[in-house]
């Protein structure tokens, strides 16, 4: 279990401590997916579909893009990551464990009594978690507060917020979209995990959010559309976002719910259902 | 003659003082800064003031994010919007993570008056008291407002402070000693205790004076802090006076009356009576007319006292 990357303490240079190459990121992403399956199967509940669709974006941030120090989670200059879609937290926990915020062995305590790994994120319990989320549509507002604080304190850190596409149905998301542009927050980047499904079906059938790109543009954002499972595109999008001045950037990442496990892909059943132990075995085999 | 002063003006002026002392004080509003008086802070510290427009839910999330980044955040709106409109945001983003956000809401209760039912904040105390980490305060006058706002800035954690639209009678001098969670006994008495907050404190004092001429000796307590509640003072009042009247500008359920009754029932059951808005909304009208119609008056408190004293 302990083939973790050894991290040195963050120095003042602005670089990612891990700096993984694309092949290394791809290997890491398979490992993270195995963690997600094992955690949720062990817990007997959780949200595999949206964790598997989001994990590549989170991995790209923590292992290549963000400046952060797992051994000093409160480092004031760190880039911040906000998981607004709190139910995708197994993906975040897997990334935080692999980057040594806490031991990988702790992952299987997910959702258990007295665990630091709650069913949805808790910023007071888990090292590295910035926001207590779980009620949807609130992460962008929280991220705006953090980005405004950076401007007030003249700090260089970036704020990244991962939204689910279902969250784009929440009114507050659009309140926040208006205000981030109004406040000209070019130090804030949103990634939308556009897996096209929500709890009870396809978003286009439940509540159609298209045209998504045009909506964000109309709200004053710089928009980028990518394949959210291709690391070269994910990394390029985050790099592009850093160069945009005077307005926030949104990256609409086309993803596949349940990505990486054949019988979970685009299968809405696995939005909020744990795999059985038999299914978990099959999934882990596919992810070897 | 009674001297009156505005609690919301006291808030605005106190914010400026706090802003001068501490650069980490940040103020948010939702398009009501001219009424909540946060515009006074905005004029002096434009870079530390953010008008969030008519986005109360977003404002609470932003407040939480700023607080998570080390800021002491004051966020203001009318009490009805600062409670009902953004309750889930208060719960998830402020109460659960116990962040350093101070909600100071003006236009509490029915004394908003003519704007009518939609603008009467009469559920706010119940909602805020249901959130475990919130300290909830309703100052009785402008002096106490200043003290409460300063205490909120100096104490880490979520606060809700409810202020009024109209000017309210001054009760305290500038040397008023205010401690969060510690009630103030304004009048000693042995026959009955009137526990009040906000605008009802001045009315309770008047009622006590009138009752004294009729041979009823009333204790009057300013229970400015609803959460945490001064249980000791309540138990003492029950033990020593044997009857309690609770007066508040709020619905019957979940406010000060409910909270005091819970302590009395558990520790020292005595007859109680309640002066509040019962279980109904008020309509448009002048503040004084609405208070009279709802029985939130000196006479209303007197009546409740006489009723409860008979049950002893």
Image: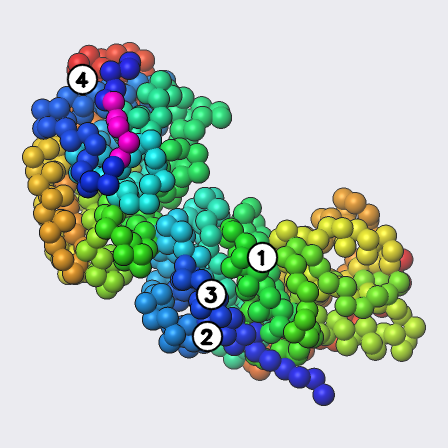
Residue B265: percent from left, percent from top: 77, 47
- Measured in 3D between alpha carbons, the distance from the residue under mark 3 to the one under mark 1, in whole angstroms, is 24 Å
**Residue pointed to by mark 2:** B37
Chain at numbered mark 1: B
SS label for mark 3: helix
Residue nearest the viewer, comparing A63 with B21: B21
Residue A265: percent from left, percent from top: 18, 27
Chain at numbered mark 4: A
Both on one chain, marks 3 and 4? no
- Measured in 3D between alpha carbons, the distance from the residue under mark 3 to the one under mark 2, in whole angstroms, is 19 Å
Residue for point 59% across, 64% down: B148
Chain at numbered mark 3: B
User: What's the mark number on residue B21?
Assistant: 3
Q: Main secondary structure of the magenta part?
A: loop
If you read the primary sequence from the N terminus, does the residue marked by circle 2 or circle 1 appear first?
2
Specify few, some or many for label 2: CA neighbours under 10 Å numbering under 14, 14-19, or 20 or more: many
Can residue B46 be seen by looking at this rendering?
yes
User: What's the mark number on residue B136?
Assistant: 1
Magenta residues span: A6-10
Which marked residue is nearer to the observer: mark 2 or mark 4? 2
- Measured in 3D between alpha carbons, the distance from the residue under mark 2 to the one under mark 1, in whole angstroms, is 20 Å
Residue for point 39% across, 25% down: A110
SS label for mark 1: strand
Both on one chain, marks 2 and 4? no
Quarter in which the N terminus of chain B is drawn: bottom right
Quarter in which the C terminus of chain B is drawn: bottom right
Residue A140: percent from left, percent from top: 29, 50
- Measured in 3D between alpha carbons, the distance from the residue under mark 3 to the one under mark 4, in whole angstroms, is 57 Å
SS label for mark 4: loop
**Residue pointed to by mark 4:** A287
């Amino acid at each position: 279990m302990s083939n973790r990357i050894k991290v040195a303490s963050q120095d003042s240079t602005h670089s990612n401590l891990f700096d993984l190459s694309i092949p290394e990121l791809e290997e890491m992403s398979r490992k993270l997916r195995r963690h997600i399956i094992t955690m949720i199967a062990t817990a007997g509940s959780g949200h595999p579909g949206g964790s598997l669709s989001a994990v590549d974006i989170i991995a790209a941030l923590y292992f290549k893009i963000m400046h952060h120090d797992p051994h000093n989670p409160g480092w004031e200059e760190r880039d911040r990551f906000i998981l607004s879609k709190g139910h995708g937290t197994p993906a975040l926990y897997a990334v935080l464990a692999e980057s040594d915020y806490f031991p990988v062995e702790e992952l299987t305590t997910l959702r258990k009594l007295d665990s630091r790994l709650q069913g949805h994120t808790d910023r007071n319990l888990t090292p590295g978690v910035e926001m207590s989320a779980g009620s949807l549509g609130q992460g962008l507002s929280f991220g705006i507060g953090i980005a405004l604080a950076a401007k007030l304190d003249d700090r260089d850190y970036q704020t990244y917020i991962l939204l689910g596409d279902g969250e784009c149905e929440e009114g507050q998301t659009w309140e926040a979209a208006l205000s981030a542009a109004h406040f000209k927050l070019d130090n804030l980047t949103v990634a939308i995990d556009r897996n096209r499904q929500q709890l009870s079906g396809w978003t286009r059938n439940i509540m159609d959010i298209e045209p998504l790109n045009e909506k964000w543009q109309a709200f004053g954002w710089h928009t980028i559309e990518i394949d959210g499972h291709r690391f070269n595109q994910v990394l390029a999008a985050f790099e592009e976002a850093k160069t945009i001045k005077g307005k926030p950037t949104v990256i609409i990442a086309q993803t596949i719910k349940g990505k990486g496990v054949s019988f979970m892909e685009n299968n809405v059943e696995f939005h909020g259902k744990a795999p059985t132990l038999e299914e978990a075995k099959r999934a882990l085999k596919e992810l070897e | 003659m009674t001297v009156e002063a505005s609690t919301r003006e006291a808030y605005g002026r106190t914010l400026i003082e706090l802003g001068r002392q501490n650069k980490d004080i940040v103020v948010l509003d939702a398009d009501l800064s001219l009424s909540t008086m946060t515009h006074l802070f905005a004029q002096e510290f434009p870079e530390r003031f953010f008008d969030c427009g008519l986005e109360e839910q977003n404002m609470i999330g932003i407040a939480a994010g700023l607080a998570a980044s080390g800021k002491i955040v004051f966020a203001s709106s009318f009490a009805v919007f600062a409670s009902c409109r953004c309750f889930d945001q208060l719960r998830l983003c402020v109460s659960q993570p116990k962040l350093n956000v101070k909600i100071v809401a003006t236009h509490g209760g029915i004394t908003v008056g003519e704007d009518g039912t939609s603008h009467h904040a009469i559920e706010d105390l119940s909602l805020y008291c249901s959130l475990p980490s919130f300290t909830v305060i309703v100052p009785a006058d402008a002096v106490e407002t200043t003290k409460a706002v300063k205490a909120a800035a100096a104490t880490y954690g979520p606060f809700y402070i409810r202020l009024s639209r109209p000017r309210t009678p001054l009760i305290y001098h500038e040397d008023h000693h205010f401690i969060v969670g510690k009630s103030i006994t304004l009048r000693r008495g042995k026959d009955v205790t009137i526990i009040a907050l906000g605008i009802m404190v001045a009315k309770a004092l008047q009622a006590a004076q009138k009752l004294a001429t009729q041979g009823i000796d009333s204790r009057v307590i300013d229970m400015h802090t609803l959460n945490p509640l001064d249980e000791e003072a309540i138990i003492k009042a029950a033990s020593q006076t044997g009857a309690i009247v609770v007066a508040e500008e709020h619905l019957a359920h979940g406010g000060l009356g409910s909270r005091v009754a819970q302590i009395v029932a558990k520790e020292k059951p005595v007859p109680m009576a309640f002066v509040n808005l019962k279980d109904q909304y008020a309509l448009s009208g002048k503040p004084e007319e609405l208070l009279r119609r709802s029985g939130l008056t000196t006479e209303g408190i007197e009546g409740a006292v006489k009723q409860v004293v008979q049950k002893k």
